[in-house]
Amino acid sequence: SESGFLLAIESSCDETAAAVIDRQRRVLSNVVASQFELHTRFGGVVPEMASRAHVQNILPVIDEAIRQAGIRLTDLTAIAVATTPGLVGSLLIGLTAAKTLAWSLGVPLVAIDHLQAHIYACQLALWSQSGQAAGQKGQAESIYPCVGMVVSGGHSNLYACASPVDFELLGATTDDAAGEAFDKVAKVLDLGFPGGPAIEKFAKAGRADAFAFPRTFIHEDRLDFSFSGLKTAVLYAAHGIQGAKVQPPPLDDARRADLAASFQAAVVDVLVAKAVQALKKTRYSSLCVGGGVAANQAFREKLEQVAKKRGFRLHVAPRELCTDNAAMGGLGWELVEKGRLAPLDLDVSPGLIR
Ligand code: KG4
Ligand code: ZN
């Protein structure tokens, strides 16, 4: 049938989110309760506290998503929930809510890969911009097949995405994720949490070539990332090395700006280079980028430059769908339509699915 309402639930990390997406993939509501203030004084997400906040937030957030969509719970056609990857305690809260609703309403349950949902955000945005509903979708409106890139606080992953639900992991970070590096470097420079937006702001006033920071693996024939060496290089440049004869000058705002700009340039260079390598390897002609770091303006601009120069199609998730949300769980419709339903004894998988 052509109508229907999907409730998507997302609780993989520190945002409690719910959204209603209709069968035409229109986002009718998109509610996110951020735990930002809860974790900010610890400089990062505290898993135990995140779980407890999810317990408090999940029902009000679902209620609000249903209310804003202008429907009733009994109008729902299916429930989608992110089950991988993420913090185990956080994932379990969303899954329990989703199972309870699916069972009590007698509607199907589907399990979402949170990282594929980040990529699917590009698809939702494309349909929404073109004014075309998924029901009438033609080849031209699909972002698939594509190289999918997810750059967030927890992940820097490259995928070969044959379809929204068929994918293969091409590469991942061997240590810190890109967003994690932004957060840690922001801490080193005393810029606060979360670090991405703070670094971006400071970088605007700095010189990207002030420091020659490492671009790990950039010329290597592998699609993995490593950002911990870069983080350490910024630490030493900012605060010096204990016991060294020559120490850096005091960390004033001008120096902070140069460090931020040079760090950001190093991350962007590596991310863009690996995305291009993945396009070559897969022979796909479309690149789709999502996750919190994709909100970064310098990254978006460099991607656009390179896409123009090399002639591949580029889709970057709109900023409001880059950071964690449940609207991107509209991906659940693809599973519903393919009949890939989840059983009620479904479990979470905190680790990465390859
Ligand atoms: O996707 P996301 O909201 O949550 C995870 O699934 O991790 O990503 C959050 C990450 C944080 O590390 C944050 O510092 C980074 O995305 N981030 C940014 C920007 N906005 C958020 N990094 C660079 N530039 C930004 N403008
Ligand atoms: Zn995420």
Image: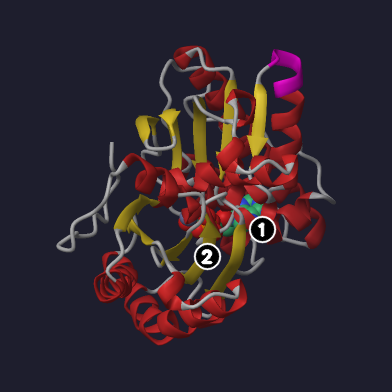
Tag of residue 320: 1
- x and y percent of residue 317 in the render? 63, 45
Asked if residue 151 shows in the view, the reply is: no
Residue drawn at x 39%, y 79% is 54
Crowding at mark 1 (Cα within 10 Å: few <14, some 14-19, many 20+): few
| Earlier residue among tags 2 and 1 | 2
Which of these two is toward me, 173 or 21? 21
Instruction: Tell me which corner region of the image, top left, top right, bottom left or bottom right, holds residue 110.
Output: bottom left
Instruction: Tell me which corner region of the image, top left, top right, bottom left or bottom right, holds residue 343.
Output: bottom left
Q: CA distance from mark 2 to mark 1?
A: 16 Å
> Is residue 308 found inside the magenta-colored segment of the image?
yes
- x and y percent of residue 49 in the render? 37, 81
Residues rendered magenta in the picture = 307-311
Residue annotated with mark 2: 20
Amino acid tagged 2 = Val
Q: Looking at the image, which residue sits at the far left?
A: 345
Instruction: Tell me which corner region of the image, top left, top right, bottom left or bottom right, holds residue 342.
Output: bottom left
